[in-house]
Image (cartoon, coloured by chain):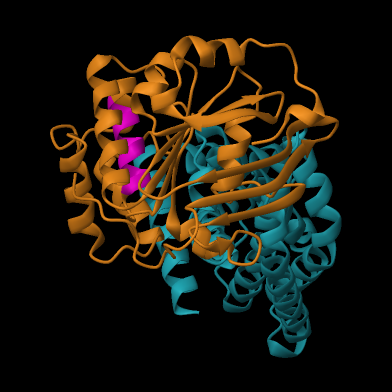
Chain colours: A cyan, B orange
Amino acid sequence: MRETLRAALTIYAKDVRLELRTRETLFSVLAFAFVVAFIFTFAFEPSPQLIASIGPGIVWVAWIFTAVLGMNRTFLLEHERGTLDGLRLAPVPREALYLGKLLSVVTLLVTVEALMLPAFLVLYDLSLFNVWFIAIALAATVGIAAVGTLFSAIAVHTRAREVLLPMLFLPVALPLLIGAVTGAREALDGEGWDGVGRWLQLIVAFDVVFLVLSSLVFEYVLEE
Amino acid sequence: MTDQPASTATRSGHALELRGVSKTYGTTHALRSVDLDAAWERVLVLFGHNGAGKSTLLRVAAALVKPTAGSVTTAGFDADRHTQRVRAATGYAGHGTLLYDDLTPEENLRFYARLHGVPQPDERTGEVLRDVGAERWAHRRVRGLSNGMQKRVAIARALLHRPALLLLDEPDSGLDVQGQAFVETVVRAVADGGGAVVLSAHDPARGLAIADDFAVLRGGRIAATGEAASAAPDEVAALLSAPPINTSEGAA
C-alpha cells in the first residue's frame, strides 16, 4: 500500500509540474468551460426564477463537457509523447498508475470548477458558494474522475479515441450525474442535510463502487 | 560506467529465456514460436529487416507486451507470474525516448528513479547523468536537445535502476560516431559488470563488432543463432536477405 501511494504521488507530482510548466490542458479546458457557460446566456433571459430552476443543470453541463475534454487528455498526452511505455515499465502495482492519474484529473477538474464559480455569479447571478453545493460538487467530481480516468486509458488505444471517451463515460456516469444535478438543486434551494444528504450518500456510494471497480480493472486495460 | 546489475536478479540459468513465444496482432504474426536464450555477461545482438519482429521480441522481453503463446523468463523470473520483478530487473530503451519534452533530463531521470523505487534517487540521477556525459545540459528542457543527446538520456533512464538485463532497440539509429562509441561503452560495461544485454541492429558489421552472440530474425522466426566471433558480416547479411523460411527452419 505504501509503495502504491509513493508511486501514485510521484506520477501526480510529475503531472502537476508538467501542467504548471506548459498550462496546455488547464487553459484549453478552462476556455472551453467559459464558452459553454457564456453560450447559455444567449439561449434564454436569465431571470431569478429560471436560474433557480435550471441553474444547477447549466453548471453541470458546463462542467461535464469540460471534464470529458480534460480527461481525454490524461492518457492521450502520455500516448502522444510516447511516455506511456515509461509508466508501464515501472515495477509498481498498476493501481498506483491509476491512482496517480486519478489525482491529476481530480486536481484539474476541481481547479476548473473553482475558477468557474465567479463566472456563474457574473453571468447568471448564481452564487454557488454554498457548503452543501460544494460538498456535492467535490463528491461528484471524484466519481467522474474515477470513471473518466479508466475510460481515458481504454480510449487511448483506439483510433476514435476522442469520440469513444464520451460514448463510454456518459452512460456509465449517468446515475452519478443525476445525483449531482438533483443534489445541487436541493443545496441551492437552501436545503440542508435533510434534502441534500440522500443525494450526497448516493454520490459517495457511486464513488466507492467506481473507485474499487476501476482500480481492479485498470491492470487489464493497460496491458497490451 | 558504475552500473552494477540489480541484486534481486537470479544468476542461475540465462538472463533471458524465450520458449515457444508467439505474438499476433489481429491477423499479423509478429513472432512465431521463438526459442531464444541470452547468457549472463554477454551481449546478444538481434539482426533483422524492418518487420522481422525485433522490436516485438524486445517488448515481450521487457514485459511491455504479453506474448500470445509461450513463456518468457527474465533474470530467473517468469514474466507472466512475476511481472513486477521482471520489470525491476530489466532496463529498456526503445525507438521513442520515453522522456517528457517539457522536463529537463534531470527532472525526467529523477521522476523515473522515484517511480522505480531507486534508493537515493537524486544522487543516482546525478551519477547516471555524469556516466552518460549529460551533466552540461541536465537543466535544459529535453525538447531543446539534439537527437543524440536525447538518446543518451534515454539510455541513462534505462540504466537508472541498475537492471540485470538491458534491452536496447536499435540504439545506434540516428547517432554519430561518438554516439555509437558511447552505446558500445555502455553495453560493454553492463555485460562486463555481470549483467546481460540484448539489442537489435540493422547493420551486420556494426552489430557483430559489439556482439558476443547473435540471432537473425526473419518473418517473426529465429533463422539462425551463433557466436559473433565465428560469423562474418557477409554471412549475416546473406541470412538477412535469404527468402522466407519454412517452419522447419525456425530452430534457434
Question: Which residue occupies the foreground of this view, A92 or B57?
Answer: B57
Q: Point out the residue furthest to the front here.
A: B230
| Residue at image point 83% right, 60% down | A172
Q: Quadrant of residue B73 in the image?
A: bottom right
Residue B94, above or below B230: below
At x 54% / y 60%, what residue is drawn?
A97
Which region is colored magenta? B149-159
As drawn, B48 above or below B138: above
Q: Is residue A221 left or right of residue B13?
A: right
User: Does residue B103 appear anywhere in the picture?
Assistant: no
> Of B12 and A21, which appears nearest the observer?
B12
Residue lying at the far bottom of the rendered structure:
A194
The answer to whether residue A78 shows anywhere in this view is yes
Magenta stretch: residue B157 in it?
yes
Q: Residue A20, position in %: x, y?
A: 37, 46
Q: Position of residue A95 (x, y in %)?
A: 59, 67
The overriding secondary structure of the stretch rendered in magenta is helix
Residue A107 or residue B177, whichever sits in front: B177
Q: Position of residue B96 (x, y in %)?
A: 47, 31
Numbered label tally:
0
Q: Is residue B83 above or below residue B160?
A: below
- The residue located at (79%, 57%) in the rendering is A54
Which residue is more in the foreground, B123 or A42? B123
Asked whether B69 falls inside the magenta stretch, the response is no
Please indicate whether residue B111 sits to the left or right of residue A200 in the image: left
x%, y% of residue A123?
A: 60, 47
Name the residue located 70 percent from the left edge and 37 percent from the top edge.
A39
The quarter of the picture where residue B82 lies is bottom right
